[in-house]
Image (spheres, rainbow, N blue to C red):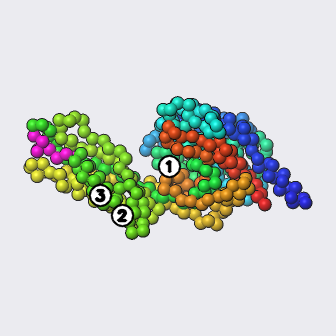
Amino acid sequence: MKKRDDLARASAECEPDLDRAERLLLEMLAIPGKSGCEKAVAEFVARQLRRAGASASAIRADAAHRRSPYGGEQGNLIFRLPGSLPGPRRLLAAHLDTVPLCVGARPVIRRGFVLPAEPTTALGADDRAGAAAILAAALEILRRRLPHPPLVFLWTVQEELGLYGARHVNAAWLGKPRLAFNFDGGSPEHVTIGATGGYRMEIRLRGVASHAGVAPDQGASAITMVALAIAELHRKGWLGLILKNGRSGTSNVGVIHGGQATNVVTPEVHLQAEARSHDPAFRQRIVAAIERAFHKAARSVKNSAGEAGTAEIRGRLDYESFRLAENEPCVVAVCEAIRAVGGEPTLATSNGGLDANLLTARGIPTVTLGAGVLNAHTTRERLDLKQFRQACRIALRLATACPTR
């Protein structure tokens, strides 16, 4: 009987103030904070923590932005709490930045969803919903003095630009957490235990300029080279969704810059492309196919003097793929927390990069779950408040290691 009463009392302690969490969310959604410009929202988070009783010395901002190629005004925000219960340290993470389409968004609630008031902006729930869910958990613990194991909360920056906050986080400040939970995405019951690896490429094609009307034969068009390369990749199945002999991956040419006038044979074009796969060896085959196509296209375009184009390609591995075992402690803890709030977890892998990729690579096994976001990065973005509330319940259970049986 006593054990049952103790579990009931602990379960009640694990129920957050969901109305207050919702208000917190709406405040955070209204703060502009595209990648590299996260200072205002980071200051909001730190201010909320201090008002709830957090020591100023427990809240720190690292210098991750200074190591990013994009610069920026703010590093990752890290808040550590010593444990009042024994157990391994737990990490709760989410990213602060939004895509540029979210700048100027005004959140409104309609029929159980949060939407952008204007049809020209995205909402920014990716990932302000996750950031609000873990902040709400931290505030509940501080205000109500809830028992908890050692904790660290991490709000990363520049996730949307290539996971640069997680890439350059000051790992020493995290305190070697053993279980880590990243809130980023759709359903809180969708448990992401693995994600693809991503390779980025910068391609420069050089040809020969000439007057397009007077002497077109004296030119070698870099635009023609681009067209030939992309057409070959498409024709041979190395562009978009790639399926070869039971292996899979994706590739994309996402950015093209070149040309200044219609009467000039374009001498130079710059492109940005990517290749992704859960299989590192197959991803390298995709990269090789892209490189081969652009070099071949450059050599094939010549002017009347026999001068051909050239291709210069630089690439880098942005993040490696990973997959956690289903019995990894963080995976088990998430599944138990989801069931404790009446849900049923579904294990999955992602074809997008996550902060979890880089945290896991740094020896911190990290599982990712959603916070109710739909149609991210579009003007149709919305947030399911029912799912957001579930994410807040799960976050508090994970932070307090609340008993589930």
Q: Which residues are magenta?
A: 215-222
Is any atom of residue 350 visible in this view? yes
Q: Is residue 251 above or below residue 217?
A: below
> Which label's residue is closer to the chain start, 1 or 2?
1
> Which label's residue is closer to the chain start, 3 or 1?
1
Dot 1 falls on a residue whose secondary structure is: loop
Question: In the rendered structure, which amino acid carries the disc numbered 1?
Answer: Leu
Q: Is residue 173 left or right of residue 146?
A: left
Residue 333: in magenta span: no
Residue drawn 12% across the image and 48% down it = 303
**What's the CA distance linking mark 3 and mark 1?**
32 Å
How many C-alpha atoms fall within 10 Å of the one at disc 2: few (<14), some, or many (≥20)? some
**What's the CA distance linking mark 1 and mark 2?**
24 Å
Which label belongs to residue 269?
Answer: none
Question: In the rendered structure, which amino acid carries the disc numbered 3?
Answer: Arg
Closer to the camera in the image, 154 or 265: 265
Q: Name the spot of residue 79 as percent of width and height, x first.
A: 65, 45
Closer to the camera in the image, 252 or 155: 252
Location of mark 3 (residue): 235
Question: In the rendered structure, which amino acid carries the disc numbered 2?
Answer: Arg
User: Closer to us: mark 2 or mark 3?
Assistant: 3
Residue drawn 14% across the image and 51% down it = 302
Q: Is residue 99 left or right of residue 86?
A: left
Location of mark 1 (residue): 163
Residue 219: in magenta span: yes
User: Closer to us: mark 1 or mark 2?
Assistant: 2
User: Are the residues tagged 1 and 2 within 8 Å (C-beta)?
Assistant: no
Quadrant hosting residue 265: top left
Location of mark 2 (residue): 285
